[in-house]
Amino acid sequence: MLADRIGIPQLRDMAGRSERVVTVIELVELERIADLFNQEWVDGKSANSGHYRLQVEAQFADHGRGFPELVCQVSGILPLSCQRCLTLLDWDVALEFRLAIVATESDLDHVTERFDAVVADEHGFSLVEAVTDELLGSLPLAPTHNDRAQCADVEEYIQAVPDDDGAAHKEQVNRPFSNLATLVGRGSRTDDMDSN
Ligand SMILES: [Zn+2]
C-alpha cells in the first residue's frame, strides 16, 4: 500500500480510526534520492539487499483541527558515499516528523504553525514521497565517516603526495573528493597539513 497514493477521503477515515501503519520502504522506492547512494555498491549488489531499508511507523490521527494529522517515525540505514574518501558509508536514519495533510492549497491557511503541511492533490498522499522529502531535508550536504580511520584511501593519498610518479595518479583519482569538499565549503587543505 505504501507505493499507492491515499486519497483524502481514505486519509480522513484512517485518521478517524487512529490507524497506525507499520511498514518497510525499500531502496528501490526511494527514486528521488537514488543518486545519493554509493554507486559502486548499487552496481555490485542487489538494490533490495535487506541491510539497507527503512522501517516506518506512521500514526494517523484526527484531533478535530479539520485535517488528518500524521506522526511518522523512520529508522534504518542508507548506503551513501563518504564525501571524504568516496567509499561506502552506512548512514543511520532516525527521523520523526509531524504532518498536516490538507486537500487544497487554500486549506493551508487553517494549519497552525506547529505543523508542516503537505497538500494531497487529486492524486492523493504518498507516504514514500513524504519520507523522501524529510530525508532530503535532513541529509547533510557532505556525509562522511565519523571515524577518519575508515577513510583509508585519503590517508594513502596524503602519504603518497611527496613521492614520485605514483603521486600524480593518486592525485587524479582523488580529485573528485577535493572538488566536492570545495563545493560544500570545507577545504581539505587544513586537514592535509595537520596530517603531515
Ligand atoms: Zn570515508
Image (cartoon, rainbow, N blue to C red):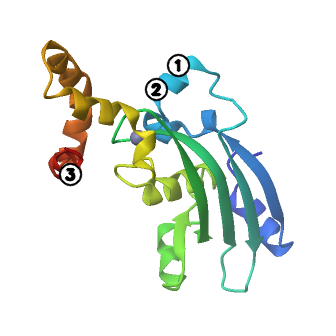
Task: Specify few, some or many for label 3: CA neighbours under 10 Å numbering under 14, 14-19, or 20 or more.
Answer: few
> Residue beneath label 2, please?
39
Position of 34 with respect to 18 (left or right) is left
> Residue 35: x, y in percent?
43, 34
Number of numbered labels in the structure image: 3
> Residue beneath label 3, please?
194
The local secondary structure at tag 1 comes to helix
Camera-side residue: 82 or 169?
169
For the residues carrying marks 1 and 3, which lies nearer the camera in this image? 3
Residue flagged by tag 3: what amino acid is it?
Asp
In the image, residue 172 sits, relative to residue 126, either above or below, namely above
* Residues at marks 2 and 3, CA–CA distance in whole angstroms: 30 Å
The local secondary structure at tag 3 comes to helix
> Residue beneath label 1, please?
43
Task: Specify few, some or many for label 1: CA neighbours under 10 Å numbering under 14, 14-19, or 20 or more.
Answer: few
Q: Quadrant of residue 154?
A: top left
Q: Is mark 1 within 8 Å of ligand 1?
A: no
* Residues at marks 1 and 2, CA–CA distance in whole angstroms: 6 Å
> Residue 41: x, y in percent?
53, 26
Q: Earlier in the sequence, mark 2 or mark 3?
A: 2
Q: Quadrant of residue 73?
A: bottom right
Q: Quadrant of the N terminus?
A: top right
